[in-house]
């Protein structure tokens, strides 16, 4: 993998502009690209930084998908309603991740990470917590919407509290995916090329 650096809780509401079923594989794959942790497929249980990040991809494919609403806590005690999405395996083309952060001496900077432009990013056993996502369309098969979250089995190790609304699907494809997410972890990722950029112009993925 070549890296090139350029210039310096069970309750919650999630905003879905399109059907959540279509977007589960998108957010699961894309959000895990650069902040994946080798922890296996399990719900994130760590305190998040309090900064969300934008992720986008030209096209996403996924197999073995499970999802349910959940919540995360920041270190400052703030809670965040999220859609927890797990995926057994998938690919992502044209991936971009961006995040703004204020730093001492230099002020606000944007971190942008891109991959999958030449060869798709591939991953297995991925979990991501997102609070907003959209897609221009796609296809999903083997959908089970309204399944009890405690019985989900699409993605290994990903299930929720009993009585909570859950969604499961066999396969999915989504195009022009855009999302904001808070945390991600995954079993394994393969990236052919990564492009990292620090910018002071306010540049973001979208």
Image: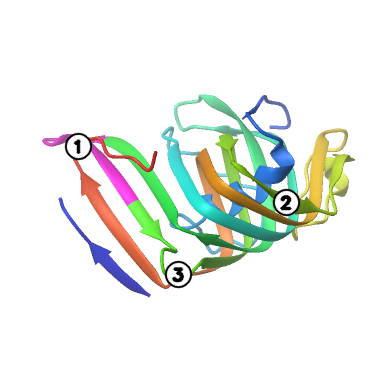
In x, y percent, where is residue 5? 23, 61
Q: Which residue is mark 2?
A: 139
Which colouring convention does the figure follow? rainbow
Q: Which mark is residue 61?
A: none
* Quadrant of the snapshot with the C terminus: top left
Indicate the quadrant where residue 204 lies. Answer: top left
Give the mark, 2 or 1, whose residue is nearer the N terminus. Answer: 2
Give the mark, 3 or 1, whose residue is nearer the N terminus. Answer: 3
- The secondary element bearing badge 2 is classed as strand
The one nearer the camera, 150 or 21, is 21
Q: Residue at x 29, y 36 (%)?
A: 101
Q: Residue at x 78, y 42 (%)?
A: 160
Q: Which residue is mark 3?
A: 191
In x, y percent, where is residue 169? 80, 52
Q: Which residues are magenta?
A: 102-112
Q: Which residue is mark 1?
A: 201
Badge 2: few (under 14), some or many (20 or more) residues near its Cα, within 10 Å?
Answer: few
């Amino acid at each position: 993998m070549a890296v090139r650096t350029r210039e310096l809780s069970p309750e919650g509401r999630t905003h879905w502009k399109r059907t959540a079923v279509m977007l589960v594989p998108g957010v699961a794959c894309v959000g895990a690209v650069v902040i994946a942790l080798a922890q296996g497929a399990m719900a994130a249980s760590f305190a998040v930084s309090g900064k969300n990040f934008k992720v986008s991809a030209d096209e996403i494919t996924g197999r073995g998908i499970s999802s349910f609403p959940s919540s995360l806590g920041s270190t400052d005690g703030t809670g965040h309603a999220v859609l927890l999405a797990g995926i057994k395996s998938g690919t992502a083309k044209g991936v971009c991740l961006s995040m703004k952060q204020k730093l001492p001496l230099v002020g606000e900077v944007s971190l942008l990470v891109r991959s999958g432009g030449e060869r798709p990013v591939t991953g297995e056993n991925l979990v991501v917590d997102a609070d907003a996502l959209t897609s221009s369309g796609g296809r999903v098969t083997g959908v089970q919407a309204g399944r009890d979250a405690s019985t989900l089995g699409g993605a290994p190790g990903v299930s929720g509290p009993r009585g909570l609304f859950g969604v499961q699907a066999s396969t999915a494809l989504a195009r022009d995916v855009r999302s904001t997410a808070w945390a991600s972890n995954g079993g394994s990722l393969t990236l052919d090329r990564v492009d990292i950029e620090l910018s002071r112009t306010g540049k973001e993925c979208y």
